[in-house]
Image (cartoon, rainbow, N blue to C red):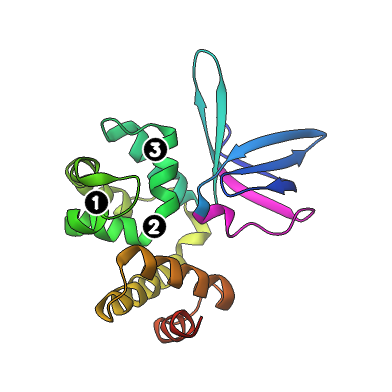
Amino acid sequence: MITSIQGKLESATALHAIIELNGFGYEVHVPVTTAEKLPLPGATVKLHTLVIYREDAQTLYGFTTPAERDFFRLLIENVTGVGPKGALGIMSRLSLSSLEGAIRAGDITSLAKTPGIGKKTAERLVVELRAKLGAISGAATDLGSESSPAPAGESAHRDAVAALVALGYKGTDADQAVRHAALALGAKSTTEALIKKALNG
């Protein structure tokens, strides 16, 4: 199984990236939350991948972290009615930390407000993934060395989103604003810095 791909980024759109490796150009399907973190074309990029095999095709899906890839796998393997395309749509709307937080909290209302999810899908996400998220977060997965900075970054992201929601932002808008702030400030930004950047644009 292909678990990652590293090569030169030839081109990218909101949902696709072309990565050149050993003379071959690989089309990788990505969520918007991954696409917005890609470097400029010509730079070297590494994506954590999952290959989906079908009778008439094999499709490569890529993510910036192993945790995002594993969540994508959870979605398509455990949530009734959610296939790869739907899973990419869900992960394009909210960051992983916001999705996991809403699912663990059973926040169907917030999930259902996310375009492309709807109430029924939100209910299935909570029912079918809540227990599995608890199990996978405590397990020794292939996060490896990336697991050290991740918790602090995810915590800061969640806290910043919560603060913006408390100020009157919609959940999706708050998450997007904090994601953009994190891109500008870096992954190790504090909650306070993220909030200030998100508010000031």
Q: Is residue 172 left or right of residue 28?
A: left
Chain-order first, disc 2 or disc 1: 2
Q: Is residue 89 left or right of residue 26?
A: left
Helix, strand or loop at disc 1?
helix
Give the residue at x 41% y 82%. 195
Question: Which of the 4 image quarters holds residue 132?
Answer: top left
Residue 112 disc label:
1
Above or below, 21 against 104 in this view is: above
Amino acid found under the numbered disc labelled 3: Gly
Disc 1 and disc 3: Cα gap in Å? 14 Å
Give the residue at x 51% y 70%. 180
Residue span colored magenta: 33-48
- What residue did someone put label 3 on? 86
Q: Nearer the viewer, residue 63 or 144?
A: 63
Chain-order first, disc 3 or disc 2: 3
Disc 2 and disc 1: Cα gap in Å? 12 Å
Number of residues whose C-alpha sits closer than 10 Å to that of mark 2, classed few (under 14), some (14–19) or many (20 or more): many
Tell me whether circle 3 and circle 2 mark residues in contact (CB < 8 Å).
no
Amino acid found under the numbered disc labelled 1: Ala
Q: Nearer the viewer, residue 55 or 164?
A: 164
The N terminus, quarter of image: top right
Above or below, 164 against 78 in this view is: below
The answer to whether residue 107 shows anywhere in this view is no
Q: Is residue 113 magenta?
A: no
